[in-house]
Amino acid sequence: MIRDIGGIFLIVLLCLTGCLKKLETRYDDGQLKEQYEVRKNKVGSYIKHGKYIRCYENGKKQQEGIFKNDKENGKHTFWYDNGHKSAQGEFNDSKRVGV
């Protein structure tokens, strides 16, 4: 029983120090603009960390990828406002890697 309580305590402690929260911003008409995950950094400010989606005003995706410590990391995909893919690439600390 004590082990179970300890595990729960550990989960609560981790959530207090680094759990992700999902946030959204919207255009004036209510259409989704951005949806992303944040966590608190060492000084207590919220930074992007996790899945990120940005949309055009017409509702079509503009960008999708992952942020790590407020910087683009991993695969990111970009689209034109007509829904056609414009680019895709790998990022490391917001710098494009590869060709």
Image (tube, grey):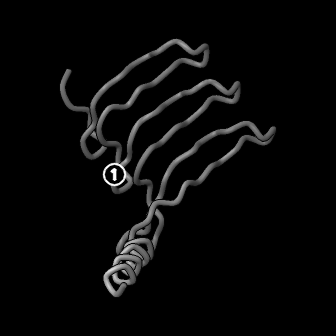
Give whichever of 3, 42 is nearer the camera: 3
For the point 43% across and 65% down, the residue is 19
The answer to whether residue 43 shows anywhere in this view is no
For the point 39% across and 19% down, the residue is 87
Looking at the rendering, which quadrant does residue 15 occupy? bottom left
Looking at the rendering, which quadrant does residue 33 occupy? top right
Tell me the quadrant of the picture where the C terminus can be found.
top left
Q: Secondary structure at mark 1?
A: strand
Coordinates of residue 17 in the picture (x, y in percent): 39, 75
Coordinates of residue 8 in the picture (x, y in percent): 41, 77
The answer to whether residue 31 shows anywhere in this view is yes
Q: Is residue 90 left or right of residue 78?
A: left
Q: Is residue 81 above or below residue 21?
A: above
Residue lying farthest to the front in this orientation: 1
Coordinates of residue 79 in the picture (x, y in percent): 50, 20
Few, some or many residues within 10 Å of mark 1 (<14, 14–19, 20+): some
Coordinates of residue 72 in the picture (x, y in percent): 35, 43
Q: Is residue 34 above or below residue 83?
A: below
Residue identified by numbered label 1: 68
